[in-house]
Amino acid sequence: MAGMGSARYTELGAFLRSRRARIRPADVGLPHGPRRRVPGLRRDEVAQLAGASVDYYNELERGAGSQPSEQMIAALARALRLTADERDYFYHLADRPVPAPGGPASHVHPGMSDLLTRLTSTPAQVITDLHVTLVQNPLAVALLGDHSGFSGARASFIHRWFTDPDARQLYPEADHAAQSRAFVADLRAAAARRDAKDAEARSMIGTLLGASQEFATLWADHDVAFRRDDRKRLNHPTLGLIEVNCLNLFSEDGRQRLLWFTPAIGTESAELLDLLAVLGTQEITGPIR
């Protein structure tokens, strides 16, 4: 077991068991079931919520598994509804550095997690103010592609939008100019809301100014506007064009947003989203980058 002492790992297992025991299935959107023998979640339920194998999670609780990755720690912290302090303690027990705020392993606001759990019939996801996707529900993955595999600067969809042409496949070409302007105005608003010395926003803006002439031109216009709600046209690889309303709920500090997508009135999108729920992710071979 690389990088960890057995005592600390035993404590990690005990910590996971204690956090699992305090959560009711209804807290995370799971049915209680008629034959439940434990008051909290079962191990297989935690594994399912975190996207881990049951065997792997069992090993973690027994204190006999391998050192969990930072991504797995983040996933388990979300599944177990850990507070920020508990999440940091979990990283300490796993002998992993606590990630800097804003990246894909950032701690999801508990209220956002609870709401996302309850949004089972509509695509929804939690992103940061710099458009880093933190967690998606299955319908959001089916609609937008799986964003969990990005890291570093590319974790931000705004960064990918201006540096990777494949990212623009999500929107029809006729909408690209309007989306570019909206992304830049939103980024300026988000950066202004942060501390003037915020390194993450400053680095992102500096990188994009050097990498994209389009971004530099739009940045010079000084447009400022948070994206609170939008009507969007999205290209789906199987279902084609889907027109949706994208609604935003901001956390108290503005650093995170819950996005959910509803069908645009007067279009066929309601039927397409119903079909999306049936198809799930089975016909999607990869993320729309």
Image (cartoon, grey):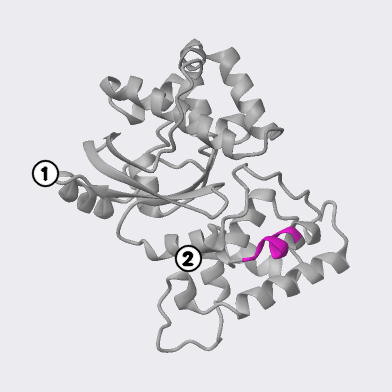
Relative to 76, 5 lies left or right: right
Residue 171 drawn at (x, y percent): 32, 29
Relative to 286, 93 lies left or right: right
Relative to 157, 198 lies left or right: right
Residue for badge 2 = 114
Which range of residues does the magenta coloring cover? Answer: 82-88
Front in this rendered view, residue 194 or 93? 194
Residue 242's image quarter? top left
Say few, some or many: other residues with alpha carbon within 10 Å of mark 1 (under 14 / 14 to 19 / 20 or more).
Answer: few
Q: Main secondary structure of the magenta part?
A: helix
Q: Residue at x 76, y 67 (%)?
A: 12
Q: Is residue 144 magenta?
A: no
Q: Is residue 150 visible?
A: no
Q: Label 2 to label 1, Cα distance in Å?
A: 31 Å
Q: Is residue 209 visible?
A: yes
Relative to 101, 263 lies left or right: left
Residue for badge 1 = 266
Circle 2: residue type: Asp
Determine whether 99 is above or below 19 in the image: above
Query: Element under label 1?
Result: loop
Q: Is residue 85 magenta?
A: yes
Quadrant into which the N terminus falls: bottom right
Query: Element under label 2?
Result: helix
Residue 83's image quarter? bottom right
Residue 63 drawn at (x, y percent): 76, 68
Circle 1: residue type: Gly
Q: Earlier in the sequence, mark 2 or mark 1?
A: 2
